[in-house]
Image (spheres, rainbow, N blue to C red):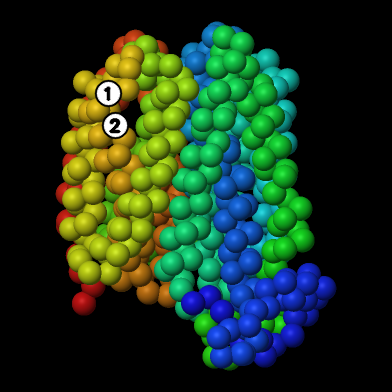
């Protein structure tokens, strides 16, 4: 698996060097090499991991910024909400930018914008600067590297193994969280929790470190190096730039918005984002710290979610091929809602077995909703399903943004996060019902 006969020459020096390094002798004496598409997928995976550092930091910054500047958690949550909203709202247009200017250019610029936004926070003194640096710049940069990046690479470079590659690249963000969360939490807790600036610089350096790999090894299309996509029987010429792709994305939105399933999918996925990125990823660490748990321990638990996130996503994809996607979503949202209702009783100074069970269970359910949601988009909208899913993903991030902000406000008002966990559990029950009433397309 993952090899093809060397019948096509590489078109540039980089491709030639990679081809020479990858050549091997099979048991039958034929010369074979790893297809260039797998190198591109590997670079994409590393890029997403490097960019995942920015997704690990917001929840760790809430308490340090509150203590140093006296900013309310609602104010800090507002900056995080802008970041999350832009992450989603930029996604539908990211593919259009890649069609117009190329994957390599868009990703390199996006990583640089993330680095600038994160790095300049070390000089901020006012909330509007946090909103500009972390909210606007990092939000725009990260939005340009959302699922559209992985989907575009997969669609261009693969005709076989698309499901496998999509699952691996989707899991890269969770893998990055696993790598960076413990490191960043350790940095922040040094010097009595006043070390948040080195953590921000670490995020900036991680993004910049990936730029050379993107520029040197990533190619926009197999035709750039004289190859067919992996698994393709015929050579696929590189398409011309599409200046009107953004207009098509908006047109598809207006068309889908006239159908009921779109609003049910978008609404349930907004609750998905609210109960994951907006709530747990942003507020779990400060909530656990409120109960006396060390920041490093809470961050490590959040990182473990990333491990089981990978397993849950792969298993969900397997189940989606065999069972009704609507029922799967209803089960996922129901289980998630029940687990959130129990979470306030599990928070304690020490990590105990019930909390470990929650982390494992929640990790398996974290993005298990993605494969069945994608399947329903394909069933309902056919050729436009990728763009429709981009807008559904935007609703996911808008939901995440609202709860990132409202969760901070609730903590300021009530002095605890309990009401947020209970409200999110109720919302998950609503998402389960919304999933069940999506009609089948005949």
Q: Quadrant of residue 197?
A: top right
x and y, in percent, of residue 2 in the image: 53, 75
Q: From the image, tell me which residue sits under label 2.
A: 356
Q: Residue at x 23, y 49 (%)?
A: 332
Is 82 situated above or below 104? above
- Classify mark 2: helix, strand or loop: helix
Q: Crowding near pointer 2: few (<14 within 10 Å), some, many (20+)?
A: some
Reading the image, the residue beneath label 1 is: 352
Q: CA distance from mark 2 to mark 1?
A: 6 Å
Residue 83 position in % (x across, y down): 54, 36
How many residues crowd mark 1 within 10 Å: few (<14), some (14–19), many (20+)?
Answer: few
Residue 327 visible in the picture: yes
Rendered location of residue 272, percent (x, y) = 33, 44
Circles 2 and 1: CB atoms closer than 8 Å: yes
Q: Is residue 327 left or right of residue 377?
A: left
Q: Residue 374 or 288: which is nearer the viewer? A: 288
Q: Decide if residue 208 is on the left or right side of residue 139.
A: right
């Amino acid at each position: 698996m993952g090899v093809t006969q060397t019948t096509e020459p590489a078109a540039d020096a980089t491709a030639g060097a990679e081809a020479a390094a990858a050549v091997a002798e099979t048991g039958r004496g034929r010369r074979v090499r790893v297809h260039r598409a797998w190198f591109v997928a590997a670079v994409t995976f590393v890029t997403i991991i490097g960019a995942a550092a920015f997704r690990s930091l917001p929840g760790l910054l809430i308490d340090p910024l509150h203590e140093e500047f006296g900013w309310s958690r609602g104010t800090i949550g507002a900056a995080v909400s802008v970041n999350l909203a832009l992450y989603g709202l930029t996604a539908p247009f990211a593919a259009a930018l890649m069609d117009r200017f190329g994957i390599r250019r868009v990703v390199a610029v996006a990583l640089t914008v993330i680095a600038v936004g994160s790095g300049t926070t070390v000089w901020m003194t006012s909330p509007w600067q946090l909103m500009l640096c972390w909210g606007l710049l990092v939000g725009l940069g990260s939005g340009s590297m959302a699922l559209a990046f992985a989907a575009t690479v997969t669609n261009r470079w693969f005709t076989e193994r698309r499901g496998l590659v999509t699952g691996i690249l989707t899991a890269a963000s969770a893998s990055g969280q696993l790598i960076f969360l413990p490191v960043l939490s350790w940095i922040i807790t040094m010097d009595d929790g006043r070390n948040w600036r080195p953590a921000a610089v670490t995020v900036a350096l991680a993004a910049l470190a990936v730029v050379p790999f993107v520029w040197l090894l990533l190619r926009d299309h197999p035709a750039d190096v004289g190859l067919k996509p992996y698994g393709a029987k015929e050579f696929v010429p590189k398409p011309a730039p599409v200046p009107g792709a953004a207009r098509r994305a908006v047109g598809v939105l207006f068309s889908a918005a006239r159908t009921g399933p779109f609003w049910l999918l978008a609404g349930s996925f907004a609750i998905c984002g609210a109960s994951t990125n907006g709530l747990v990823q942003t507020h779990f660490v400060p909530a656990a710290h409120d109960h006396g748990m060390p920041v490093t321990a809470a961050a490590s638990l959040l990182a473990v979610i990333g491990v089981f996130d990978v397993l849950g996503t792969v298993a969900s994809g397997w189940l989606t091929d065999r069972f009704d996607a609507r029922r799967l979503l209803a089960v996922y949202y129901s289980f998630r809602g029940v687990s959130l209702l129990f979470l306030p009783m599990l928070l304690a100074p020490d990590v105990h077995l019930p909390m470990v069970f929650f982390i494992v269970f929640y990790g398996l359910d974290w993005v298990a909703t993605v494969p069945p949601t994608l399947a329903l988009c394909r069933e309902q909208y056919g050729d436009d399903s990728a763009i429709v899913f981009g807008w559904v993903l935007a609703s996911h991030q808008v939901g995440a943004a609202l709860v990132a902000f409202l969760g901070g406000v609730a903590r300021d008002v009530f002095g605890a996060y309990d009401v947020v966990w209970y409200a999110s559990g109720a919302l998950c029950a609503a998402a389960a019902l919304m999933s069940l009433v999506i009609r089948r397309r005949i």
